[in-house]
Image (tube, helix red, strand yellow):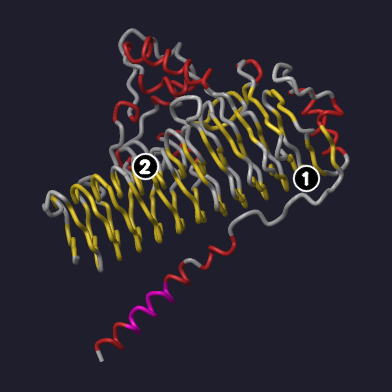
Amino acid sequence: MMRSALLILCLFTLSVHAQQLDWVKKVGAATAPKGTTVYYANTYGAVSDTVTVNTKAIQKAIDACAAKGGGIVAFKPGTYVTGAIFLKNNVRLRIDKGVTLLGSQRFEDYPEIDTRIAGIEMRWPAAMINLLKVKNASLEGEGVINARGRFCWDKYWKMRKEDYEPKGLRWIVDYDSKRVRTLLVQESEDVTLKNVTIKNAGFWTVHLLYSTRITVDGLVIRNNEDGTGPSTDGIDVDSSTWVLIQNCDIDCNDDDFCLKAGRDYDGLRVNRPTEYVVIRKCIARRGGGLLTLGSETSGGIRHVLATDLQAKGTTNGFHIKSATTRGGIVEDIYFNNIHMEEVTTAFHFTMNWNPAYSYSTLPEGYNPDSIPVHWKTMLMQVTPERGTPHFRNVHVSNIKAKAVRRIITAQGLPTSQLENFRFDQLDITAESKGTLTQVQDWTITNSTLNAADKKPFQVTDSKNVQINE
């Protein structure tokens, strides 16, 4: 009788979850370019000599292809240097095996555009490859894009260590250094990115911004080959919807798969969520987190399924982060069927992340009337009512992890507890279990949690926490 009741309960729960996740089958690009005529960039003047900057020649091929209604832009085998290029409607940029695109190492080859970076709208260099207000386009192939981003890394560290940190300006150096992203999809729809290998990003590798119906399939990202670059995120989904990411393999130096939705006053003004996102069958090697939500949460992040993923040496497994000036709601998140190995913290949830970076204060000696516009944007005040973030309704299941330092680090706020987190079927071996502070309605069920220090979770200032191992 008891077994029958439990079976009915499980079937009911699965049915409810299936209804809740009915949206999953709708994610990804609905169309792809159909044109078959090939426009070789070489015909328009592109030269494979690793020296010539071929930006104009490649752009001519793209423009000619688009003018004829679409088709394929490709390259003869070789290595081609380029600055910022811009894809058009119905164009398939094909980087075949045996073809390498090298990013120019001159900032002047990346003209500034209106975009959003790290949560605020501002002028910023165009990416190496850009899809701006594009419909029905793709980047595909088995070739290589090597952004050669060290020139951006060196600029950032020099500014930060020699000038900005000594002046109390840590909070703005990331915005002033204006590093180059590798691939930007902005205000676009029905875009496919498939199979290409991308290396050594100067900043974020793939940025999906204000876009819908995007498929990212089979990308390989290797950002640490030329050294350890700062903020070389793998794939950032930023105020975008109906996104499918699958079969990707990322090794980077910051968040591997990251969902964002705007920062502070400017993010609250824009108020655009990231929602309806599926990430499946992917691997994260080095990086800040297998799956990270935030810290830019202002527009809200919701309706996310992350499943069948592997973390091999990332700092965090599942990381939700924000700050008390961000606001926004993170909710309806599913994280399941995950394998982690040599991860520092399996689950890390915080609403007061990295204060030195997260909170902006103008030091004495600066005139507020003469500072750059984006400084003024960052300094706009947010009331506590708008700035308090909320994390709720998070479902974690079927997690296997070993060689973990901490299982959970969770810290809410007195005014916003981490609410309704459900963990089921965890099998984790770690040095310690960790801490839960300011959480409410948490359950851990059907789990085996082995901590080398033999100590239980430290639970403080929390309500209705049930841990049944």
Q: Which residues are magenta?
A: 7-16
Q: Position of residue 269 (x, y in %)?
A: 47, 38
Residue receiving disc 1: 90
**Disc 2 element:** loop
Q: Main secondary structure of the magenta part?
A: helix
Q: Nearer the viewer, mark 2 or mark 1?
A: 2
In which quadrant of the rendered view does residue 112 lie? Answer: top right
In which quadrant of the rendered view does residue 90 lie? Answer: top right
Q: Amino acid at mark 2?
A: Gly
Q: Name the image quarter holding the C terminus.
A: bottom left
Residue drawn at the location 58% of the way across and 58% of the way down: 27
Residue drawn at the location 88% of the way across and 41% of the way down: 68
- Residue 166 numbered tag: none
In which quadrant of the rendered view does residue 358 lie? Answer: top left
Q: Position of residue 104 (x, y in %)?
A: 64, 20
Q: Position of residue 296 (x, y in %)?
A: 42, 39
Between residue 242 and residue 93, name the one nearer to us. 93
User: Residue pushed farthest bottom?
Assistant: 1
Answer with left or right where residue 301 lies relative to residue 395.
Answer: right
Residue drawn at the location 43% of the way across and 48% of the way down: 300
**Disc 1 element:** loop
For the residue carrying disc 2, how many other residues have a C-alpha within 10 Å: few (<14), some (14-19), or many (20+)? Answer: many
Residue receiving disc 2: 313
